[in-house]
Amino acid sequence: MPDGSQHIDWMVAPDSGGTQPLISFRVAEPLDRLSAGGEALAERIADHRPAYLALEGPIGRGRGRVTRIGHGAVVAARRLGENQQNAGWELEICWESGAGASGGCGIGQLLRLRPSKSSLWTVFCVSINRTSGSQ
């Protein structure tokens, strides 16, 4: 940020083509570092433009810069609960090994996201599977 501060935005594309606005959360630590049984708070923030999936570097107009610290793919998603207002999600994520890596699933993680209050969500790591090589 221009003032020297930093934050982590976790963005999820709701479509496989990455053309729709990104569902976005602000988190204190990268979620791929959560251990099985661990949890974190995520603040639901405004959706981001799909361009952020590939953006790295200055944002423009003095608003700071983007540094990608990790990426992966949602390989399965399941809605939890029937009430649209309070429904959560279960996401199976394949995190690639390190920022800029491609072609391999370094960490397979099952996360449950549940709305907590206001714009806060709880992210719970159900399980984790560290792999080597590609899947």
Image: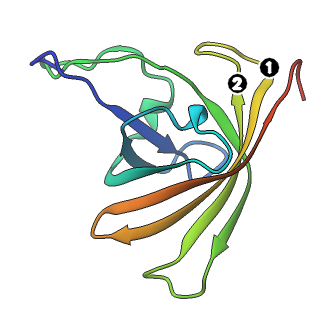
Residue visible at 50% across and 31% down in the picture: 53
Q: Which residue is mark 2?
A: 96
Q: CA distance from mark 2 to mark 1?
A: 7 Å
Residue at the far left in the pictured view: 3
Query: From the image, which quarter does the N terminus lie in?
Result: top left
> Which residue occupies the foreground of this view, 112 or 16?
112
Q: Is residue 77 left or right of residue 18?
A: right
Residue visible at 59% across and 87% down in the picture: 82
Residue visible at 30% across and 63% down in the picture: 119
Residue type, numbered disc 2? Glu
Q: How many marks?
A: 2
Say which quarter of the image contains residue 8.
top left
Where is 24 relative to 61, above or below? below
- Residue 103 disc label: 1
Residue 64 in view of the camera: yes
Residue type, numbered disc 1? Gly
> Which residue occupies the foreground of this view, 35 or 95?
35
**Percent position of residue 11, x then y:** 47, 42
Where is 59 relative to 80, above or below? above
> Which residue occupies the foreground of this view, 16 or 90?
90
